[in-house]
Amino acid sequence: MRERRAVQEARRAREFEAFVAGAGGRLLRTATLLTAEAVEDNPRARRLLTHALAHTYAYWDRLRGDDPYNHARECLAVRFARRAWHQYGAVPFARARTRTAGPLAALSPQYRLVLVLRLHEGVAEEQVAALLGLPPERVHLICDRATTLVLRPPRGPAPARVGAKAAAS
């Protein structure tokens, strides 16, 4: 009985290692986009991925034919959403308080989450809505706004005219 259990555990570990070898890089990229950290320096993204992979490994035997990548991605999204909720409060559009350097740093956590799931991961609008507990129309609106903010960032204030006072005097 013990030998059989040991063989099953070894098989499970090999399957999970193969999964991480194949999907780990993409999941890390997704986590890095969510946390808006630089690719070279992403400790929060790595921590987020570690928790998602640990959760996936714990449920490995219960997945039974389900896609482990979908499970791990869902764990990433839910953990990120919870962390953002607790860190930034109930205001879903609050800007990040920490200094970030990623390409999506100007977006709020909710905008980043929807944009990454929809465009980077290719998750259907209805699935994102169900995952986040939002209506699909809201997810569509958030994705459109986030895309606009990334493609056309708001301009900063106009530069001050240096010689304006001297010319007026």
Image (tube, rainbow, N blue to C red):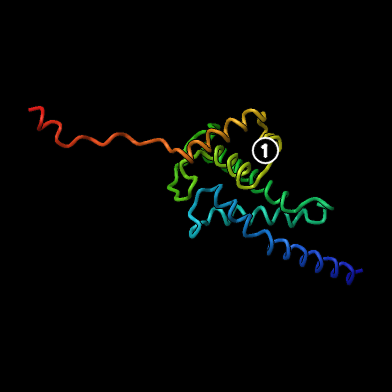
Of all residues, the one furthest to the bottom in this rendering is: 3
The quadrant of the rendering that contains the C terminus is top left
Q: x, y (%) of residue 38?
A: 48, 54
Mark 1 packing: few (<14 Cα in 10 Å), some, or many (20+)?
many
Viewer-side residue, 80 vs 167? 167
Viewer-side residue, 27 vs 94? 27
Q: x, y (%) of residue 75?
A: 68, 48
Question: Looking at the rendering, which quadrant does residue 50 occupy?
Answer: bottom right
Kindly identify the amino acid type of the residue bearing the numbered disc 1: Val
User: Which residue in the structure is indicated by mark 1?
Assistant: 128
Q: Which residue lies at the image location 81% right of the left edge and 52% below the top edge?
A: 63
The quadrant of the rendering that contains the N terminus is bottom right
Of all residues, the one furthest to the left in this rendering is: 169
24 is higher (above) or lower (below) than 133: below
Q: Which residue lies at the image location 77% right of the left edge and 67% below the top edge?
A: 14
Q: x, y (%) of residue 164?
A: 15, 32
